[in-house]
Amino acid sequence: MDELKIMRKYKIPEPYKPERHPKGWGYEDWVVNKKYCGKLLFFQKGKRCSFHYHEKKYETFFLLSGKMEIRVGWKDDVNGREVKSYILNPGDCLEIPRGLRHQMIALENSKLFEFSTTHFEEDSKRIIKGD
């Protein structure tokens, strides 16, 4: 019984409303962007983000649902021999170090978690425009 009394002392906060950022490929819900960044990305089937990289930001992605193709490489040529393509399925995790060019393509409607160092828009160096 004591536990119930203790529990009643705490108020459950209202659900946090993420900051929505519409994109051509879907949208991003930003949960936090201070010393670190947490986002939930919603990609529409057939849509892609830009082929880009970051000089400051280090990213880790976790595919919650859907299916995605990820293209990565150290040079600016998205169709070059150095660019590798990987398929992500739910539960797959991928780390993107600073400077690695990358592009995500939704093979199905997809939900992707992004955990990273702080996001600065000017740190996104876009090589090829996305949707």
Image (cartoon, helix red, strand yellow):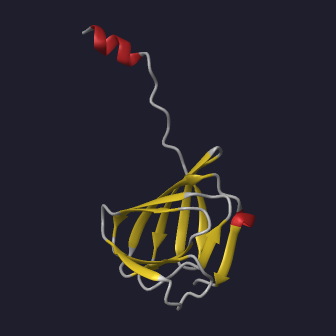
Q: Position of residue 107 (x, y in %)?
A: 37, 82
**x, y percent for residue 96:** 51, 64
* Nearer to me, 96 or 26: 96
Q: Which of 44/77 is in front? A: 77
| Residue 9: quarter of image | top left
Q: Nearer the viewer, residue 121 or 96?
A: 96
State the residue at coordinates (35%, 79%): 108
Which residue, as the protein is rendered here, is positioned at the far left?
1
**Quadrant of the image for the N terminus?**
top left
x and y percentages locating residue 15 in the rendered image: 48, 42
- Quadrant into which the C terminus falls: bottom right
Task: From this view, report whether residue 110 is shown above or below residue 40.
Answer: below
Query: Where does the image place residue 83, in percent across and percent down from the top left?
Result: 49, 83
Residue at x 36%, y 18% (from the top left corner): 7
Quadrant of res 88: bottom left
Residue at left offset 33%, top offset 72%: 66
Q: Quadrant of residue 28?
A: bottom right
User: Going by the picture, which residue comes out furthest to the right?
Assistant: 122
Task: Judge from the rendering whether residue 2 lies leftward or rightward of residue 76; answer left or right.
Answer: left
Could you say which is closer to the camera, residue 68 or residue 26? 68
Q: Residue furthest top?
A: 2
Q: Residue 23, relative to residue 36: is it above or below?
A: below
Query: How many numbered circles are shown?
Result: 0
Who's the residue at 30% across and 65% down the image?
Answer: 90
